[in-house]
Amino acid sequence: MPLTYAIFLFFVAGLGEFMRRGGLDLTPLASAGVVGVMTAAFALFLLGRDVPSLIRAPGRRLYDQDGLGWSWGRSVSLLGLIPVVLSVPIACGLLLTDIVVFVPGVQSLLWALFVQIAIIALPQELFFREATLKVFRANLPGAFGVSALAMVLYKLPEGLPAALIAAGGAFAFMALRVAGMNILLVAVVHGTTAVLFGRVLVAELSGQALWLYATCCMLGHAMFALAVVTVLRARRPIVVEAGTEA
């Protein structure tokens, strides 16, 4: 399965770059939709018989491993961590520049949320987090690393700063999922965060400041993920290798 995952990953990354360059002469939204559909299809293929667990809470055991499940109650309680996730880019931005607050129209805001959540965030969370977690379920640190590296590969055509920011997001969103949040809710958090920092809280950064911001976000979210995993280790076993527990 790791080989199949790698093939799908390179195909998605290549398709994303092809569509960004104007492939098929589609609008940006339609291009994002094509990439999203393919990404989600690959994720569902990898999940296979575990697809129902995307909605039906499996308990603690999932993908033949203890501690990888989720519940709706835990998903709601973990929403309390969202301010911590948001504080990282806000703090990094304030250290480097002023953050301008925009108030978009309600209709524009709702449309942006729909696009970011349904077309962009949901397919990415299904593939880069949930499918990754299943494929690398026997090695949790590896799942975090692969998720982050996969996002770097996927976002690299947009520039290394964008790739670093995406890698940081991968750490944070994977941490929420591993802590027991439903991946659909993680996708909502992902999409809402993208709209918040793309449409409402805007920091004008370029050159060295942009590099510092991207590095700060990546490291901050990596530390958040490490803290979450450390707490989970203390509260319940986390499988790190097949047949062993931490």
Image (cartoon, rainbow, N blue to C red):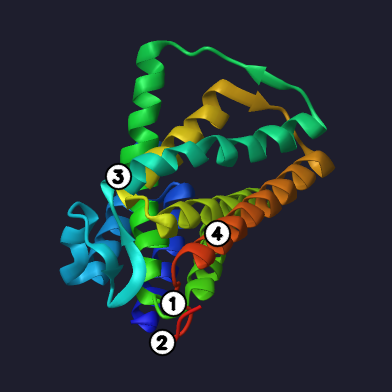
Cα distance between the residues tagged 2 and 4: 21 Å
Going 42% across and 68% down the picture, which residue do you hit? 9
Secondary-structure class at tag 3? helix
Q: Could you tell me if the residues under marks 1 and 4 are in contact, i.e. CB atoms within 8 Å?
A: no
Cα distance between the residues tagged 1 and 3: 22 Å
Q: Could you tell me if the residues under marks 2 and 1 are in contact, i.e. CB atoms within 8 Å?
A: yes
Q: Amino acid at mark 4?
A: Val
Residue with the mark numbered 2: 242
Label 1 or label 3, whichever comes before in sequence order? 3
Is 73 situated left or right of 12 in this image?
left
Residue with the mark numbered 3: 73
Label 3 or label 4, whichever comes before in sequence order? 3
Secondary-structure class at tag 1? loop
Cα distance between the residues tagged 2 and 3: 28 Å
Percent across and percent down for residue 22 are 44, 46
Residue with the mark numbered 1: 239
Q: Could you tell me if the residues under marks 2 and 4 are in contact, i.e. CB atoms within 8 Å?
A: no
* Label placed on residue 231: 4
Percent across and percent down for residue 169 are 55, 50
Going 16% across and 70% down the picture, which residue do you hit? 49
Evaluate whether residue 111 shows in this view.
Answer: yes
Cα distance between the residues tagged 1 and 4: 14 Å
Count the marks. Answer: 4
Cα distance between the residues tagged 2 and 1: 7 Å
Q: Residue furthest right?
A: 208
Quadrant in the picture for the N terminus:
bottom left
Percent across and percent down for residue 172 are 54, 51
Going 52% across and 67% down the picture, which residue do you hit? 233
Q: Amino acid at mark 1?
A: Val
